[in-house]
Image: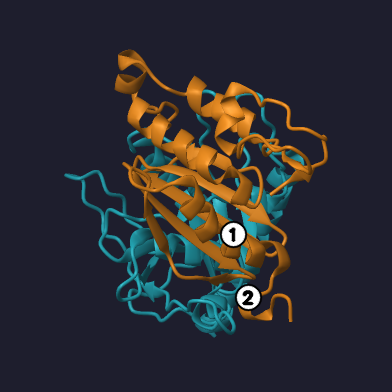
């Protein structure tokens, strides 16, 4: 999570309110991930109407796909390794790819299902699945942090802090 | 005319044979108009390039030459690749291949998933608009793996050990001259090989 000392917490913008953990009397205030707003705008501006979706040129999202993607980014932004590159796959799923120095994370949103595929130093790790319909921000971030840590440091959990 | 290398139907794939995966232009969402993307060759790759959900378990590849990427083989395969992506829904634009040597697929190093590329020439089928491709090969999905797991693993391998062979729309004069010289050399070689065979 990105932290910055602002003294007392100032209200955050509407688009990033989900990562705001509540009022704090003192100490650091969480600052929302810089890229979140930009990515949210991309998703929002890619929601197609009937005409665009009929054209089916792979550039437009349905409202359901967009809202699932928004939920994922809002819930998980603080625990993700960086700004994603997002696109619609040939199978119609929404894909977000995060690159780091030590590997990459591919997130695939299919309906309300989120599938994560980390690759650390060229080695694919186990697939992880979440239901975005039932997932909450805390559990998703808790699940993502170890993956992000490995991708940032190139070290597995057991090696960390030793 | 220089001879094009055409592998025999059952000719096993050699360790140094360049094996390529066709790439299409990276898709962008309608709202993604302002963001730039790094233009290093590895940034051209996306996991979607390796996703093969149609054929259960087989990911299509091309044999791009005998020992290195052969420009004549590329020329044969290019229209096939262009037609293939153009006929997709939605249509895509073919931009080139990412390739690696076959032994890097077979033994990629500790921890990485290995794949054995197998020759699988495609026979022409006019009814289904399928063009002949003697250079076609494939790798099989590993038991229990999904199309996405396979795509992620293959992407990691090609990104780590591969090179990009991008096709350009506009051909430079240098390219045209080098192709001409290549063709002339091929004809001279064929002439001498034939002459020595006649003796």
- Taking depth in this image into account, of B51 and B197 the one nearest to the observer is B51
**Disc 2 secondary structure class:** loop
Vertical relation: B155 (above or below) A80: below
Quadrant in which the C terminus of chain A is drawn? bottom right
| Rendered residue at 40%/41% (across/down) | B85
| Rendered residue at 63%/29% (across/down) | A38
Q: Which chain is orange?
A: A
In the rendered structure, the answer to whether residue A154 lies left or right of residue B72 reads right
Tell me the quarter of the picture where residue B9 sits: bottom left
Number of marks in picture: 2
Same subunit, labels 1 and 2: the answer reads yes
The chain to which mark 1 is attached is A
In the rendered structure, the answer to whether residue A64 lies left or right of residue B81 reads left
Vertical relation: B151 (above or below) B11: above
Q: Is residue A3 visible?
A: yes
Q: Give the distance between the C-alpha atoms of the residues marked 1 and 2, in whole angstroms.
A: 12 Å
| Rendered residue at 54%/23% (across/down) | B31
Q: Which mark is residue A145?
A: 1
State the residue position of label 2.
A156
Q: Residue furthest left?
A: B127
- Taking depth in this image into account, of B117 and A89 the one nearest to the observer is A89
**Disc 1 secondary structure class:** helix
Q: Which chain is cyan?
A: B
Residue A98: x and y, percent? 60, 50
Residue B37: x and y, percent? 68, 38
Q: Is residue B158 visible?
A: no
In the rendered structure, the answer to whether residue B28 lies left or right of residue B173 reads left
């Amino acid at each position: 999570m990105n932290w910055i000392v602002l003294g007392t917490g100032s209200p955050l913008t509407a688009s990033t309110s989900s990562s705001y953990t509540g009022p704090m009397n003192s100490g650091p205030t969480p600052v929302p991930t810089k890229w979140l707003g930009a990515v949210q705008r991309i998703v929002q501006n890619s929601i197609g109407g009937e005409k665009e979706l009929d054209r089916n040129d792979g550039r437009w999202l349905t409202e359901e796909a967009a809202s699932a993607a928004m939920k994922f980014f809002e819930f998980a932004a603080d625990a993700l390794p960086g700004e994603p590159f997002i696109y619609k796959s040939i199978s119609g799923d929404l894909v977000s790819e995060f690159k780091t120095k030590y590997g990459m994370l591919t997130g695939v949103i299919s309906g309300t299902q989120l599938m994560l595929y980390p690759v650390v130093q060229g080695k694919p790790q186990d697939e992880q699945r979440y239901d975005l319909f039932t997932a909450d921000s805390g559990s998703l971030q808790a699940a993502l942090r170890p993956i992000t840590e490995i991708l940032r440091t190139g070290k597995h959990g057991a090696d960390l802090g030793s | 005319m220089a001879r094009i290398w055409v592998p025999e139907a059952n000719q096993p794939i050699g360790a140094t044979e360049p094996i390529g995966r066709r790439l299409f232009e990276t898709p962008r969402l309608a709202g993604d108009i302002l963001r730039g993307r790094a233009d290093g060759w590895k940034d051209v790759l996306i996991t979607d390039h390796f996703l093969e959900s149609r054929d259960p378990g087989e990911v299509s590849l091309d044999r791009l030459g005998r020992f290195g990427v052969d420009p004549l083989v590329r020329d044969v395969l290019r229209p096939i690749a262009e037609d293939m992506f153009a006929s997709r829904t939605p249509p895509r634009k073919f931009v080139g291949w990412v390739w690696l040597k076959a032994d890097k697929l077979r033994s990629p190093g500790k921890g990485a998933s290995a794949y054995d590329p197998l020759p699988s020439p495609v026979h022409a089928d006019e009814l289904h608009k399928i063009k002949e491709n003697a250079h076609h090969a494939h790798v099989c999905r590993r038991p229990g793996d999904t199309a996405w797991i396979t795509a992620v693993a293959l992407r990691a391998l090609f990104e780590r050990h591969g090179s990009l062979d991008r096709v350009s729309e506009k051909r430079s004069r240098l390219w045209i001259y080098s192709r001409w010289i290549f063709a002339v050399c091929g004809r001279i070689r064929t002439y001498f090989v034939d002459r020595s065979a006649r003796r």
